[in-house]
Amino acid sequence: MQQTTMAILTLYGVLSVTLLALWMRHKSVLRQRKRLALKLGSMKGNLSETSERLDLLSRGVDTILSDAPEVHDLLGVHKSLEAAESLLFNQGIPVSNSESCAIVSHAVKALLSHYPEDGPEDERSIVQGLKPLSKRLAAILTEAEMKAEDVELSAAEHRRAGELFHSVERFDWAADCFQRANDLDPEDESALRSLSEIQRGNGDFDSLDRTLERLLAIVPDDIAVLNEQSILLDSMDDERFIRNRKRLEALGVASTPSEEEGELSLIAQRARDSDVGGATQSNTASGLIEKAAKQLLLGELRAALESVEAAIERDQSFGQAWSLKARLVAAESGKIKDALKCIRRAKALGEYTVILESEILDNDGRADAAIEVLQEHLSKTPGDAEARGKLSQLWLASGSAESARKTLSDAPEESWSSATLHVMKGRLSLVESDEHRDETGKIDPMPVIDALVSFDRAVEIDRESGLAWLGRARALRYQKAFDEADVALVRARRLIPDHPSIALEEAQLSLETGDLEQANALTLEATTTLKDNPTVPFIRGIIAARHGRLEEATKLFSQSLHIDPNHTRARLNRSSAALLSDDLALALDDANRLVEDRPNHELARLRKSEILMNQGDWEKAEFELRELLRLNGSHSMGLVHLGTCMIAMEKSEQAEKPLNKAIETNPSLSEAWYQRGLLYLDFGRSDEAMSDFEDAVRADPQHLDARLRIAAILHEGKDTEKAAGAWRKVLDVDSQNRLARRRLEECRAQITSRREALLPKD
């Protein structure tokens, strides 16, 4: 019984514990259910918010790109690239080569569909967003270890793909695509030009040479390609070098290298010769310098500097490397100190650096230091003609012509076998001629002759001296030998095509020969290289004045004077333009400044007298004219103006003598005849006045005032028909002249009435 009771109690206990456990479990499930419900609600809210955000983002993207559907369509390209990546790398199943090519080809074509071929590469625009996709495509191709030949595209498509890769600086893939495009279409010139650009930047001259040769097969007369390949060829005996030179000569282009090109070619040759056995290896210091010199000739400055740095790493004692590095470093702004350090290192290694050092200092605005460097060098080696010529040039540029002349006069006799000194002597003679012109208004022929002798001597010594031909052209222009000057300029442009003064001298020659359109075009060319040269706006001002655009001419002459306040011809021409524009105040200010600064300048005094005459200040005008005649007693216009002043001041009896002398000095001066005719009218000597007016018209058929006087005298007489003829001639000169038209009608009326009076009466 007791055992039974214990068993029942134990059973109740077990049931109680079980029920308690079940109740607690139930409570736990309820709590978990509640928490799960809360989480589900929160997740639902988050999903709803995320959905709203995605919807807002989608609508925003659609709104923003609504005006650029071509960018919106790039999403399809993105999907194509995603699919290609997934198929090639992320599915875990090996893909055959043919399948891989098909996948990649599809992706590339999707990209190219947004880069159509509708014009030259430099005129086609790349849709925004296409470049990042091009980078991604290049990464896919690289990871897939593919080449351009694995992608199934046409030649044009390969070229366009290369252009996209080129735009994102994936030059490896760009070059591969351009090469493949040329393989598929050997006549594709654009692909070869793009390929050559990449090879030039990489310094891969062997490949570049082959590409240029293929280009010449397509365009055999391309001057730029012929010149570039000539630079790359190692030997002037190479048959391709000879071929290129002949083609350039046939095209009328000089194959003679410029001074800078010759110097860089010499650096390359010296580097080549410095190798043992004469065989330059690309990984040696000399080979790298030769490569750098060629890169510099091709305009690749950054690549050239990298090659020079590599050469210095291989051989710290290679002087040519330090010299060339100085040249390259000096081209970068703010690197003058580093350039000078390189020069000192090169000089210590035996390199000739004095000219380069002086140029670097001068370009940095330290002309005094440049002069000092050259003077110190010449004190030790006085026979260095190049250094002496450079020193003379620096003295001249700094405004000390006397020091420049003394530098040449101190040169030892043996130095004069160099064309450089003769060129500088000629330039100084032209400077002397310019100074005389600024002082008097006339060119002194003797310095011009001396200059021409010097330039001719320089040409005898070195017929390839472009500066000698340029100076000769200018001297011949001063002598009015325009045809010979043009020939000399053609030679100069062939020898030194990039010299900034060539276009300016050609513009001045065109101005002298009256070809204003050509002069204007050449002046615009000169503007690109000569930013602060007063002659550029001066020539443009002369052109504007000759076209009658006086306001524009005045502004251009003002620009010249802003650059150089002592520019005599600009001030004189601004005074003339202001006078013609009735701005007498400005005209007189300029004339006064000229007369004060250049008291012997005849044209300045004449211009001042004309301004004073326009103002009615006859006494001051007379004073200026008498000063002018003191300088030149036979100045015909001065004599005419003096006669005009005498007549205006009612001193007619004193006017005849200067007018007679003016006619005697210059019988073809119509104004002298006209003024004397007015004088004779004052004296009542009509017949003599008529004779002078007729002589004025013979000298200048367009002299309107003289024709008006003739017609007026005839009109007052009885010969109506002659008067009518005279008035018609006035209208031939000025068809809008109202007086002539009215007087002609009067004459016609008189002639008609006279004829009617003579008709028989019924």
Image (cartoon, rainbow, N blue to C red):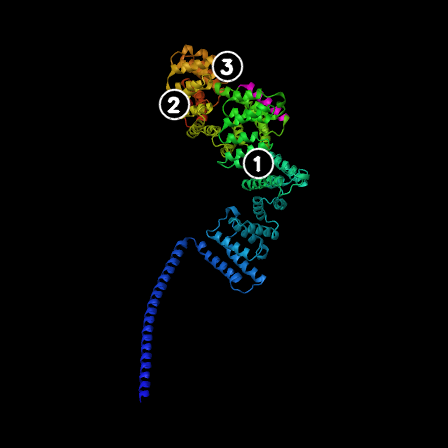
Label number found at residue 191: none
> Which is nearer the eye, 71 or 552?
71
Q: Are marks 1 and 2 in contact (CB under 8 Å)?
A: no
Q: Secondary structure at mark 2?
A: helix
Q: Where are the magenta residues, as a range?
A: 444-460
The spot of residue 665 in percent (x, y) is 50, 14
From the image, tell me which residue sits under label 1.
Answer: 322
Name the quarter where the C terminus is drawn: top left
Q: Look at mark 2 in the image and give the residue it sits on.
A: 584
**Alpha carbon distance from label 1 to label 2:** 62 Å
Q: Residue 402 location in percent, x, y?
A: 52, 20
Note whether 221 is above or below 76 in the view shown.
Answer: above
Instruction: Specify the amino acid type for callout 3.
Output: Thr
Mark 1 or 2, nearer chain start: 1
Report the number of discs: 3
The reply to whether residue 252 is in sight is no
Tell me the SS state at disc 1.
Answer: helix
Q: Is residue 395 above or below residue 231?
A: above
